[in-house]
Image (spheres, rainbow, N blue to C red):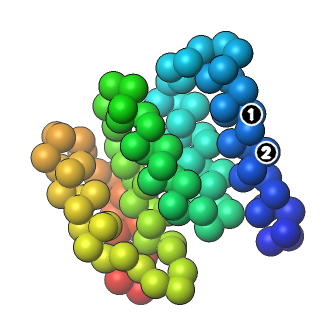
Amino acid sequence: KACKVSKKWKEALRIFEAYKKDINPNPSLSLYTATMSVCHKAGQWDRVLELKTDAEARGLEFDTIAYSQVIASVAAALPFKPIALIEGLWAEMLEQGVEPNAYTYAGLIEAYH
């Protein structure tokens, strides 16, 4: 299953990039979040951060779902957990006035597991 998942994130990114090229160069936050979810499940937290950077460069403002996805992805990073990065994301989220939900807290708690 791990091999299957590892290939799916690459295909998801390919489809996402094709959408940006062929349909709309400025995808919605929902498409970014969906792509981040696939990358998260494959353990590609660095790709999740790249997608976050790209979305923000396009002027998208992250909501609770998007921030929660990024926090959960980084919290699941193995073999290490970049706590300072997670705490920075948490602080950024709160500074932006984005309200955390249970999924956000679960990701934050996972960082300390």
Residue sitting at x 61%, y 42%? 35
Q: Position of residue 82 (x, y in %)?
A: 36, 76
In this view, 2 is above or below 59: below
Q: Position of residue 4 (x, y in %)?
A: 86, 63
In this view, 28 is above or below 50: above
* Left-right relation of 55 to 37: left
Mark 1 and mark 2 in contact? Answer it, CB < 8 Å. Answer: yes
Residue kind at label 1, given as amino acid type = Ile
Residue under numbered circle 1: 15
Residue under numbered circle 2: 11
In this view, 19 is above or below 98: above
Label 1 environment density (alpha carbons within 10 Å; few <14, some 14–19, many ≥20): few
Residue kind at label 2, given as amino acid type = Glu
Query: Which quadrant would the N terminus be assigned to in this image?
Result: bottom right
Q: Nearer the viewer, residue 22 or 36?
A: 22
Q: Position of residue 107 (x, y in %)?
A: 41, 66
* Left-right relation of 4 to 10: right
